[in-house]
Image (cartoon, rainbow, N blue to C red):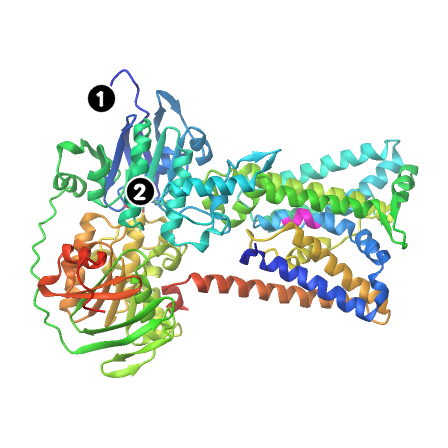
Amino acid sequence: MIRSTHLPLLVTLGTFVLAYALCAYDYPSMLSTRVVANLLTDNAFLGIAAVGMTFVILSGGIDLSIGSVIAFTGVFLAVILRDTSIHPLAAFMLVLILTTAFGAAMGALIHYLEMPPFIVTLAGMFLARGAAYVLSTESVPITHEFYDVLQGLYWKDPSGGRFRLIGGIMVLTFLVGILVAHRTRFGQNVYALGGGGQTAKLMGLPLASTTIRIYAISGGLAGLSGIVFSLYTSAGYSLATVGVELDAIAAVVIGGTLLTGGYGFVAGTFFGILIMGLIQTYIVFDGTLSSWWTKIVIGGLLFAFIVLQKGLTWATQARRRTATGSAAAS
Amino acid sequence: MAHDIPPVLHATGISKFFPGTIALDDVELRLEAGEVHALLGENGAGKSTLIKCLTGAYQRDGGTIRLSGHEVAPQSTAESQKLGIGTVYQEVNLLPNLTVAENLYLGRQPMRWGLVDRRRMNAMARDALAGYGLDIDPAEPLTAYSVAIQQVVAIARAVEMSGKVLILDEPTASLDRDEVQLLFGVIRQLKARGLAVVFITHFLDQVFEISDRATVLRNGRVVGTRLLSEVSQKDVVTLMLGRQLEAQVHERKAASAGAKLIEIDGLGKRGMLEPLSLALREGEVVGLAGLLGSGRTETANLIFGAVQADQGRMLLRGREITVGNPREAVRHRFALCPEDRKTEGIVGDLSVRDNIILARQAAQGWVRPIPRAEVNEIAERYVRALDIRLASLDMPIRLLSGGNQQKALLARWLATNPDFLILDEPTRGIDVGAHAEIIALIEQLRADGMALLVASSELEELVAYSTRVIVLRDRRQVRELTGAEITPDNIVRAIADDDGREVA
Ligand SMILES: Nc1ncnc2c1ncn2[C@@H]1O[C@H](COP(=O)(O)OP(=O)(O)OP(=O)(O)O)[C@@H](O)[C@H]1O
Ligand SMILES: [Mg+2]
């Protein structure tokens, strides 16, 4: 059944279909599985991080640290694989534990010190970036046969598209994210928190554990995203992925999630990511447009979506509004 | 009282301090199994604060709580819920972004294979709400439904959560007679099961109907606990106020009405309100009676321009006017004090003073700020006139007790000095003492030549101040009562359609 809360998701879906149709009209070859496969591969790390960001934004928060955490993860892996004989899988586990704990710590600060998420995660952003610098200021290449194995894993479509492991990880992350958001108690608590912290508290919601878990998930997924990024680039560089948190926020908003929290869908973020990837691909196909056009189009889209959300909020409120002093006072 | 069984809940020595206020001082509350215990007191007496201390929403500053003889110290509402205490707090407390079913089962959703079983959750919600006579789609967002329905959902949630104690803080304020009866039915069942129920309300009739005992608070202290079968309403009121409430001698002064102020001719909106005609003179109070959803609030909104009418016209002192929005209404010196203070009225984080002055400042435009001294003078005048209990004019209004917020909102509209004042449920959540004062105030404003339109579900109250009463049913004006016709019985009969439809 179509409900008004689903509208932003439908708009996102519509935008995606429309955008793809336009692209395919200009460049029919964009319909190939090769392009689809690359779309998934190229946006894998961003998509994974955006799942975490969706949870954070649904709860009414924000996480500015993820770009730095991704870079830190990459450098950490590169350095540890260069300097020790630890198996990459063990290194993955280690870095996931680290980043999850880092997120949890930020969540705890936000909850117990009642500090705005913006400030706490801004501090986290500097901290993680700084830690990456401390490990190495140079780009450290990763050469490990296990990496080669992982990078060689793909499923080849008969028509030539290569669906690689990391794209699969992203899709899997989204599927799990959808399940967690909509079908678990924790997921419901995330929405409840976004709907109103005070009310949720009176309803008996475990505020502390929910907040901590949300940021732990965001941190952990940023770690996973970092692993995927290192598989994608075969290197760790402390200056990499600057501003990725903003791309993730953009994807979440284009995906129809309300920035103020409480309304939205993880699946929407998936299409947000695809829309952004599509724009990029179009510009590559075109060849003459400057890559800055990506930013401009995404900016325009963001703006349109925010206006749309505002409009929807107004529409629902106007329907509910009866008499009011606030209307007279405005 | 059985002495071998410990009370279900026994709180002793509960204290709570806020800056500038001693909200609770050495309070004792004893709840026996299978009793309905009313908690009474004036606005600001500390009832809601006591509930919040008992359920862990506030940390108390002193005292002990025993549940079935064991000491407990809930640190959060989650903990008190686990202990079997279900609570409906005074401020409607559900989440607008969730569906009805999600709200009902937040935190205890039915699970299957480790996942929330939405289908079963919706089915359970449907069943649970059917017990309250509600046939709604629980998969819809909560905000798709009226405040009354939301309130029933909140109650249903608390009932499902209460293994030992159910606490209801003014649950019936926005409910109709029938809904109240349904709620009482549920309370009686719980009582038979041996639960203790705490019931807070300002409707004394309801207190005497459902409760066994009452504890009365005044200024944060317990002034007595009474078996209600042994006392009269008057005793309880005297205990609450610490003084006798003067008997209300009510001789309605003949409608010494002045010039015709406003004439409403066939004003209506399709699907919302059938055309309504009504003329009001200066110095007249017209009451609007009718059941919940009969169109009282809609009438008020339509006249005030909060909702656009699509037919009919309005004349002010013989000249036709258009009221397209509340701002125009204010320019014509109209005022509307809305029913739902929480979502439409107060600005929680602004000070009490700013909240009171808001509409007046808006009416004269923000570029001409009202001088500070005048603001203070106005705010203080209304705080005194309406007996608003507060620690200081600077405190954020959300920290006031529920009833005092309501009074502050009334003050906001009185401060605009309107010619035509529309009041929607002016006494909701207001204690008996203040209730009488507000009725006196309406009488006073009328005598001063103001025209008033008052929507209320309390018939006694309507009878007390109205010079005419218009009865609405199914969003239609069905009857007008004047003079000696205005009695509670006649209004009830008109609402229930016992006599003819001669007035269409
Ligand atoms: N968080 C707070 N900070 C400061 N003062 C508060 C706070 N909460 C309540 N108060 C004050 O404590 C007193 C008791 O308030 P409470 O809400 O318990 O009254 P009440 O008996 O429930 O009244 P009502 O019938 O109007 O709901 C009031 O004077 C109120 O202003
Ligand atoms: Mg209260």
Q: Using the image, name the chain to which the residue with label 1 belongs.
A: B
Q: Is residue B271 above or below residue A52?
A: below
The residue depicted at 53 percent of the width and 35 percent of the height is B110
When asked about the image quadrant of residue B263, the answer is: bottom left
Question: How packed is label 1: few (under 14 Cα within 10 Å), some, or many (20 or more)?
Answer: few
The residue depicted at 31 percent of the width and 74 percent of the height is B267
> What's the mark number on residue A196?
none
User: SS class of the residue under badge 1?
Assistant: loop
Q: Spot the residue most to the bottom.
A: B319
Asked whether residue A157 is in view, the answer is: yes
Quarter of the displayed picture in which ligand 2 can be seen: top left
> In the image shown, does B468 or B57 lie closer to the viewer?
B468
Question: How packed is label 2: few (under 14 Cα within 10 Å), some, or many (20 or more)?
Answer: some
Identify the residue under disc 1: B1
> In the image shown, does B267 or B319 lie closer to the viewer?
B267
Q: Is residue A53 magenta?
A: yes
Q: Using the image, name the chain to which the residue with label 2 belongs.
A: B
First to last magenta residue range: A50-54
Identify the residue under disc 2: B182
Q: Which quarter of the image is occupied by the C terminus of chain B?
A: bottom left
Amino acid type at mark 1: Met
When asked about the image quadrant of residue B87, the answer is: top left
User: SS class of the residue under badge 2?
Assistant: helix
